[in-house]
Amino acid sequence: MNKYVRVMDGLRSNAGGFNYKLDEVNIAEKWNLNNLDPEEMGGFNFGTEDKILRWLHRGDTIYDVIIPDDAEVINVDQEKGIFRSNKIIVTNPRTITDEIVLDLYKKNTLSNKILAQCLMTLIWKERLDVVKYIIKDRVNSNNVDEIIKEFVEYAGDKNLSYKSTQEIYNILKEKKNEKDKR
């Protein structure tokens, strides 16, 4: 089984502002297991190590997540690896570095579609060298069209106008041109 993890800015969630206690049980103020609307459901989001790459834009620190025995847990989104629980323990904080990002990339089980979104979220975190590594390692003639399509769609016009996004988009187009020349 994959290890559960969570990304935050220090001990504060940037998706709701909750201040977590380290190495203690954190109990959600709101929890409605029968409602999948995040606002109505409440609880705490976390992911698995093999899919957390998609959520690294959520903060600067990654934590291991322990689920107490009496907690309720649901899998909210299998593709993106989102889980939610009424109780969690956050432990083992680590500042996210390029090395950690690369390690998580090597463990990832994300689809090409979600990985293309990761490229954009990693650009937001100014991890261009990591993005270039991922493109070199993962993008090929069989998936370049799908990745470009999803990257452009996820980035949107506003993000595509930024210099760093254009640089990555141009690298992806070069990969496509190599494919088209064959």
Image (cartoon, helix red, strand yellow):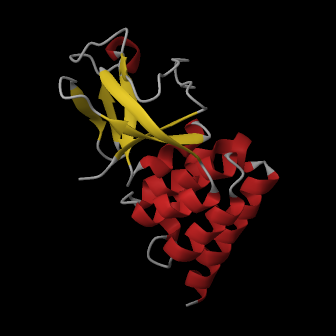
Q: Is residue 13 above or below residue 91?
A: above
Q: Is residue 83 visible?
A: yes
Which percent across, then down, holds residue 180?
57, 82
Residue 101 drawn above or below residue 77: below
Residue drawn at (57%, 40%), measured in percent from left and top? Answer: 61
Q: Quadrant of the C terminus?
A: bottom right
**Residue that protrudes farthest toward the top in the picture:** 29
In the displayed structure, 85 sits above or below 51; it is: above
> In this rendering, does residue 150 appear at all?
no
* Left or right: 59, with 32 as reference point: right
Q: Foreground: 180 or 120?
A: 120
- Which percent across, then down, holds residue 177? 64, 79
Describe residue 56's horizontal placement relative to residue 126 as left or right: left
Residue 89: image x %, image y %?
37, 29
Seen at 52% across and 57% down, the residue is 116
Residue 39 occupies which quadrant of the picture?
top left
Residue 74 x %, y %: 23, 30
